[in-house]
């Protein structure tokens, strides 16, 4: 349903309601090998679909689907920057994907997925607020502080949220060190929505850590890699 809604929004932006679509999507790094084919079949379970979204009718035919590892595609445009040893970290809502890219080449055997995303940080903050202040704070407020570092709320609430988010960010770096991250020997690239946690609450060397704040970077990578593949095979795009 979410895929169809996304397709409808894309088509609406182009003033279209009918199209043949090739899906470019992703899975966590360590899931690609075992779940890629099943996910592809799931996305292509219907050859065509007629549906209504926001009171507008759409007809979509599916030409194919390509599945990529999350995170790596976000670095697609800047692979030339990955000289020497590099760690790429994609912090999403529910998972944190880790990949080594050495001299612009990803190391398939050094890919890891940790259940350590922004949602878990929100849960930790919510628990701390309830425990220390006896108050339930709307997730919207918590997410705003995580994204920007502040919000229009009382200082005592800000203090608890910032401290918990800071502790959570320290745990992220602890997880990275468990995967042999050494800031003196390698550069760190952070992509995904969770990059704001590193930027706002992390303690790191800004000269050796790059945070890609474009939350659409991974999706743009999916699209670019699929476009290249289709063009290489002689296909046409509109």
Image (tube, helix red, strand yellow):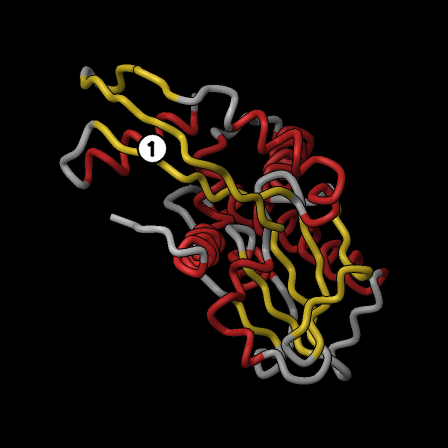
Q: Is residue 113 above or below residue 46?
A: below
Residue on which disc 1 sits: 7
- In this rendering, the count of numbered labels is 1
**Image quarter in which the N terminus is found:** top left
Q: Is residue 148 visible?
A: no
Which residue sits furthest front? Answer: 234
| 203 or 55, nearer to the observer | 55
**Disc 1, SS:** helix
Which residue is at a point 74% across and 77% down the rendered structure image? 183
Which residue is at a point 50% across and 74% down the rendered structure image? 78
| 196 or 235, nearer to the observer | 235
Q: Is residue 195 visible?
A: yes
User: In the visual, does 126 lie left or right of 17?
Assistant: right
Q: Is residue 20 above or below residue 146?
A: above
- Pinpoint residue 81: horizontal percent, then vertical percent: 55, 81
Q: Is residue 234 above or below residue 60?
A: below
- Pinpoint residue 23: horizontal percent, then vertical percent: 44, 39
Q: Residues within 10 Å of mark 1 (few under 14, many from 20)?
A: some
Q: Is residue 171 above or below residue 66?
A: below
- Pinpoint residue 136: horizontal percent, then vertical percent: 55, 25
Which residue is at a point 64% across and 44% down the rendered structure image? 117
User: In the visual, does 140 lie left or right of 195?
Assistant: left
Which residue is at a point 71% across and 57% down the rendered structure image? 98
User: In the visual, does 162 lie left or right of 154?
Assistant: right
């Amino acid at each position: 349903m979410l895929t169809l809604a996304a397709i409808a929004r894309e088509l609406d932006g182009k003033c279209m309601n009918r199209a043949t679509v090739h899906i470019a999507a992703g899975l966590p790094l360590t899931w690609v090998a075992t779940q890629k084919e099943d996910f592809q079949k799931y996305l292509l379970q219907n050859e065509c679909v007629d549906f209504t979204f926001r009171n507008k009718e759409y007809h979509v035919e599916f030409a194919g689907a390509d599945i990529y590892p999350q995170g790596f595609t976000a670095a697609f445009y800047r692979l030339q920057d990955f000289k020497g040893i590099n760690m790429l970290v994609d912090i999403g809502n529910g998972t944190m994907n880790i990949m080594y890219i050495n001299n612009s080449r990803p190391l398939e055997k050094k890919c890891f997925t940790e259940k350590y995303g922004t949602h878990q940080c929100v849960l930790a903050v919510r628990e701390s607020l309830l425990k220390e202040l006896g108050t339930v704070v709307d997730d919207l407020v918590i997410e705003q502080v995580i994204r920007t570092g502040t919000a229009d709320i009382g200082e005592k609430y800000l203090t608890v949220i910032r401290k918990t988010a800071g502790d959570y960010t320290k745990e992220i770096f602890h997880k990275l060190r468990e995967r042999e991250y050494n800031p003196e020997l390698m550069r760190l690239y952070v992509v995904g929505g969770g990059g704001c946690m590193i930027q706002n609450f992390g303690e790191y060397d800004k000269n050796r850590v790059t945070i890609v704040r474009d939350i659409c970077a991974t999706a743009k990578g999916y699209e670019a890699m699929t476009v290249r593949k289709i063009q290489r095979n002689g296909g046409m795009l509109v």
